Amino acid sequence: MTQGMWHTQKDGDVVTLARALPARFDVSATASFPMLARTRLAHQIRQDMWRALRNIRGFSPVVRVERCDTGLRVTAGGRVPQPISKHIAERVESLLSDEDLRARWIKCAKLRVSG
């Protein structure tokens, strides 16, 4: 499925949101989250990652959200032109561990109970 210029791929327990296909991680970081709406979480992370890394020429974000036994495992990063600077991975890791951002993402991606 394509949403604007973003491609959303759903395959069982995995949702991948990418700017360009095929989705590729030249740089990435991972984090755990409680069970949330996977697509909404991916979009929230993608927006903040894009803001943080938009000055990197050629950067193409990718967020992968996978259900696991303990909740969700998020891999965020994306395509980066060569050579890859170590500070890019550090910025993605810092973003995923930012408590204020995590709280906002969790609030926005909470599962909605119908009934």
Image (cartoon, rainbow, N blue to C red):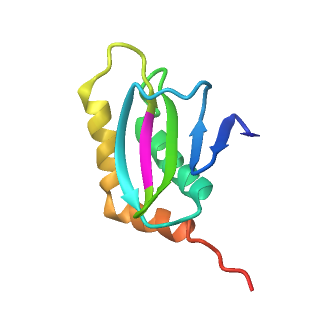
48 or 55, which is in the foreground? Answer: 48
Give, as a single range, the part of the protein colored magenta.
Answer: 73-77
Residue 14: x and y in percent read 56, 47
52 or 95, which is in the foreground? Answer: 95
Residue 25 within the segment the image draws in magenta: no
112 vs 21: above or below: below
Residue 112: x and y in percent read 65, 75
Quarter of the image where the C terminus is located: bottom right
Q: Quadrant of residue 52?
A: top left
Left or right? Give the position of 35 relative to 29. right
41 or 88, which is in the foreground? Answer: 41
Residue at image position (32%, 57%) is: 98
Residue at image position (61%, 53%) is: 39
Residue at image position (32%, 32%) is: 88
57 vs 11: above or below: above
Quarter of the image where the N terminus is located: top right
Q: What type of secondary structure mainly makes up the magenta span?
A: strand
- Name, please, the residue furthest toward the top: 82
